Amino acid sequence: MIENTGLSKTGRNSGAATETGDRPAVRPRTVWALAAAIIVVAGLIAASLAVGVYDISGQAFGSEMFWITRVPRTIALVLAGAAMAVSGLVMQMLTQNRFVDATTSGTTEWAALGLLLTVLVVPEANMVTRMVVSSVAAFIGAMLFMLILQRIVIRSTLIVPLVGIMLGAVVSALTTFLAAQFNLLQMLSTWFMGSFTQIVRGRYEVLWIVGIVTVLVFVFADRITVAGLGKDVATNVGLNYERVLFLGTGLVAIASGVTTVVVGFLPFLGLVVPNIVSMMRGDNVRSNLPWVCLGGIGLVIACDLIGRLIIMPFEVPVSMVLGLVGAVVFISLLLRRTA
């Protein structure tokens, strides 16, 4: 068993994992709680399949519309929610900071820049090409963020997300400038606005890639957990720290790049869910992963349902609801940490 000391030599507050190796025994109460969470998420999935403007039970072609629109949209919500929540957990472990996810580290802004460059340089590029370029740009941005963190002395946990937010703001300004120069501001605003409105059959299948990313996080959870204890500890127990850092950053970049191309930004999803799970269950990362997946799926579906129902028959983008929820939780975490 490896115990987290809570503060690494670099001064970063280690909010990551605490245990590896010895697996804690699963208590019956935990099993029942997990079963209850699965039932709640299954209920949200059923609600997502049932809610919509088109009356699938009373109008013509209801069955066809169900399989063309409702099912793809719900699958996209499940895949994107789980992947972005797990990606946030990975980022928090690698940076040893609870306030970091793809949006507060600037990773999603880099993905949007890569997407814009693809449109400018190769306008006829298909979705796969855009995803690859966007993921590569997100990876470059995430690695640059990591390098900056290693170069500065961190005296407060709030410095880490602040660096990411400033880096993301610079990249976002560059992206907006390029979009304005080439009359692509409307297209850019669509990318920044995370929404599942346009998800239909034939437009969501690439999101299975982020499903594979989620599975890989489960596979490498122990290695990422040890890396979250810091470079010195990880090296002392025989872990190749740089390789795990490269792997974890790559998984986050792929999830961010693919999600940005298909549905846009999902702000704070990777920040809110891992923190809530950690506050309720502690810091055992491997045992928290199913909860993080369920939390991500449940939160994004709940926000999407609110967006669909609040001004029906019109829709509010899920990113607006997520941004509101995430901002409230983020400020609450800051107040809780500084209290």
Image (cartoon, rainbow, N blue to C red):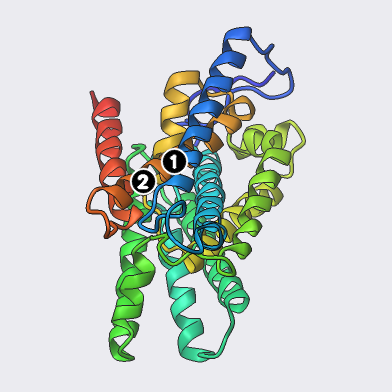
Say few, some or many: other residues with alpha carbon within 10 Å of mark 2 (under 14 / 14 to 19 / 20 or more).
many
Q: Classify residue 301 by image quadrant.
A: top left
Residues tagged 1 and 2 counted as in contact (Cβ below 8 A): yes
Which residue is depicted at the point 48% across and 33% down?
A: 43
Q: Left of 164 or right of it: where is 323?
A: left
Please, is residue 334 above or below residue 198 in the view? above
Mark 1 or 2, closer to the camera: 1
Q: Left of 100 or right of it: where is 72?
A: right
Furthest-top residue in view? 28
Which residue is depicted at the point 53% across and 55% down?
A: 76
Q: Position of residue 36 (x, y in %)?
A: 53, 21
Q: Residue at label 1?
A: 47
Amino acid on which disc 1 is placed: Ala
Q: Position of residue 136 (x, y in %)?
A: 58, 69
Q: Residue at label 2?
A: 305
Amino acid on which disc 2 is placed: Leu
